[in-house]
Amino acid sequence: EVFGASAPELGGGFGRSVRAVEEVMDRYGPWQNYECEAIKADLVALEWNGTGRVRLQDFYTAAMQGNHLFSENKDYLREVGALDESEPARPMVLIPNFLLSPANCLGGTRHYSVCCLSECERLYRPLEEHLGASEAPPERILELVQRLGSSSVAAPRALPEPLRRRLIDVADHHGGLVPLHGRLFAQWMHHAFPRECPYPHRSGTTAPVRGPEWQERTGVNFMASASELQEHIDQCVAASEDDCSTSMPWVHAEELHIVVPKSPGHRQPTVASAVRLSMMVSCVAALGIALAHTALGSARKLGVAASSVPKAGLFV
């Protein structure tokens, strides 16, 4: 099918074969994503109170009952950012973080891996297209997001007031506009779409590493044994369910992935610009001294008195 549909104008030669291979690669990701959707459905069935999280004891209980996909070591889940330990006694697995982690990537090559497609990216796309800017007023973003639907969220909908206030707080933090590519807005999107958008951990606190690589580095099996699974289940069950919070954590810490330059009239000198200026002055001075030495050497060869040659200081 792919070969027949790929650039027939190229004939049956090498070019058409290359195009067919490229087409197979383009189609393989979406085709493979059906497995990711099945994993997500299993996780949503275990979800805790609509938070986009699965209690670790429920995650591991599913593994004990035969779902081998849910048996990653707790330390490995933490490393790849799939674990919410805002309540240390009641750890939870973040559904979108787990889906998008290397734990669910198929073996690829050293150049690429085939991983689950991000539903959150598809939610960002219409925002970027309609806003046409990297930052926007919160009212405009709210208007658009309320019209966005996903595989688990029906649209249109009215966003709850606490979530609306969160976005306004983000805008206030940035002087009235919300940067679309910052950590705070990503966290807000996680609250708006907890099953689709991953929780954005702070930089440096997680590392997207494949299980075998983590195992080689730590010397610990990235898949938990049956006894380890049972131990974690017992520990989590010991914590009273009555105390288990249904709220989602919010960490007011910003990280901007795209820095919007200031207008030309608001440019301010920085340490970096001062260093660059100092280096330029040093280079000019060094060039002047080199020219002076060259001139002096030439003058001596020609028998000209050194006193008639300009001093190095005149070139600085």
Image (spheres, rainbow, N blue to C red):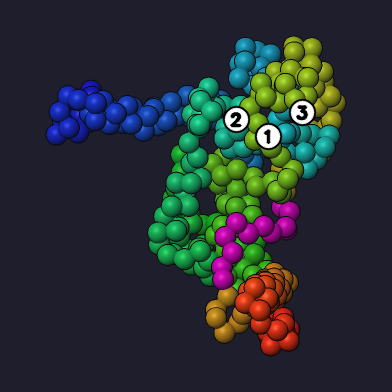
| Element class at badge 2 | helix
Q: Residue at x 60, y 56 (%)?
A: 257
Mark drawn on residue 91? none
Q: Could you tell me the amino acid type at mark 3? A: Asp
Q: Residue at x 60, y 82 (%)?
A: 266
User: Residue 155: percent from the left, percent from the top?
Assistant: 44, 50
Question: Horizontally, is 106 left or right of 156 in the view?
Answer: right
Q: Which residues are magenta?
A: 250-261
User: Which numbered disc flags the more N-terminal residue, 1 or 2?
Assistant: 1
Q: Could you tell me the amino acid type at mark 1? A: Val
Residue designated by label 2: 102
Residue furthest to the front: 303
Q: Is residue 207 above or below residue 46?
A: below
In which quadrant of the rendered image does the C terminus lie?
bottom right
Question: Horizontally, is 179 left or right of 202 in the view?
Answer: left
Secondary structure of the magenta portion, mostly?
A: loop
Seen from the viewer's position, the closer of residues 185 and 277 is: 277
Residue designated by label 3: 75
Mark drawn on residue 80? 1
Whether residue 48 is visible to the viewer of this picture, yes or no, is no
Q: Is residue 244 above or below residue 33?
A: below
Q: Could you tell me the amino acid type at mark 2? A: Pro
